[in-house]
Image (cartoon, rainbow, N blue to C red):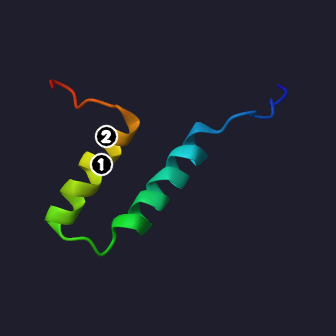
Amino acid sequence: MEKKEKQFDAVKMMRDIRDKISAETQNMTFEELKAYIKKQLVDSKTKLIGQ
């Protein structure tokens, strides 16, 4: 069986994004983290589930 080369690696992308967020938020207080999440949601125009 031939192994196809991936053109897009979703697992790598998810890990890269998680590492970036972890680096940006590592020393934040809970209140700072809530503000960070709120800003990210507003900037991306994403709504929380059930909102």
Give coordinates of residue 25: x percent, y percent. Answer: 34, 66
Give coordinates of residue 46: x percent, y percent. Answer: 33, 31
Crowding near pointer 1: few (<14 within 10 Å), some, many (20+)? few
* Quarter residue 31 falls in: bottom left
Give SS at disc 2: helix
Q: Residue at x 59, y 47 (%)?
A: 12
Task: Judge by depth and name the residue closer to the eye, 47 or 7.
Answer: 47
Left or right of 50 on screen, residue 16? right
Q: Is residue 32 above or below residue 12?
A: below
Q: CA distance from mark 2 to mark 1?
A: 5 Å
Q: Residue at x 58, y 37 (%)?
A: 10
Please, what is the three-letter code of the amino acid marked with disc 1? Answer: Lys
Task: Judge by depth and name the residue closer to the eye, 46 or 16.
Answer: 46
Task: Judge by depth and name the residue closer to the eye, 10 or 32.
Answer: 32
Q: Which mark is residue 11?
A: none
Q: Residue at x 31, y 40 (%)?
A: 41
Left or right of 42 on screen, residue 35? left
Give coordinates of residue 35: x percent, y percent. Answer: 22, 56
Task: Judge by depth and name the residue closer to the eye, 10 or 42.
Answer: 42
Q: Which residue is mark 1?
A: 39
User: Which quarter of the rendering shows the C terminus?
Assistant: top left
Q: Residue at x 15, y 24 (%)?
A: 50
Q: Which residue is mark 2?
A: 41
Query: Do labels 2 and 1 touch, CB within 8 Å?
Result: yes
Looking at the rendered structure, the number of numbered marks drawn on it comes to 2
Q: Residue furthest right?
A: 2
